[in-house]
Amino acid sequence: MYPKEVEEVSEIIFECYEEDLLSDFKNRTKDWIKPIAISVINEYMLPKFLGGEDLVLTVKDALQLIVDLKVKVSIASLKERGLVDTIEDEKGETVIFLTKEGKDISKHLKKDKHF
């Protein structure tokens, strides 16, 4: 649970990015993308809230956030398809790796020179 102010601004920010995300991830619905996006936005805005900053995005923030959103949605999509998985390393950082199926597809793509 995030502070109400963070959740409210995250909803507004998601609405700004919604069309772009749905366009990039045509095979995904708003209902699938939104929880992932809101989580990313909440995590991005929480330090601003805790630091007493205004809950606004600079141009630099907005550009970084769209990159983060697209990366997180892509990873979630690949993870759901069983092509990648994640673990936490000893430092608590997330490590992404190819599953057996992901490796098999990667080998096939390399062999067919599509990759």
Image (cartoon, rainbow, N blue to C red):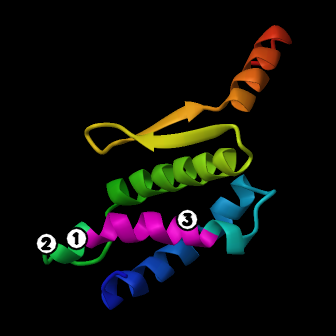
Alpha carbon separation for disc pair 3 and 1: 20 Å
State the residue position of label 2.
51
Counting other residues with Cα less than 10 Å from the Cα at mark 1, is it few (<14), some (14-19), or many (20 or more)? Answer: some
Where disc 2 sits, the SS reads loop
Give, as a three-letter code, the residue at label 3.
Ile
- Quarter-wise, where is residue 18 in the image? bottom right
Q: Residue at x 53, y 66 (%)?
A: 37
Q: Position of residue 88 (x, y in %)?
A: 39, 43
Asked if one can make out residue 19 in the rendered structure from this viewpoint, the answer is yes
Q: Position of residue 68 (x, y in %)?
A: 46, 51
Alpha carbon separation for disc pair 2 and 3: 24 Å
Counting other residues with Cα less than 10 Å from the Cα at mark 3, is it few (<14), some (14-19), or many (20 or more)? Answer: some
State the residue position of label 1.
48
Residue 36, disc: 3
Q: Which residues are magenta?
A: 34-46
Where disc 3 sits, the SS reads helix
**In this view, the mark in front (2 or 3):** 3
* Circles 3, 1 touching at the beta carbon (< 8 Å): no
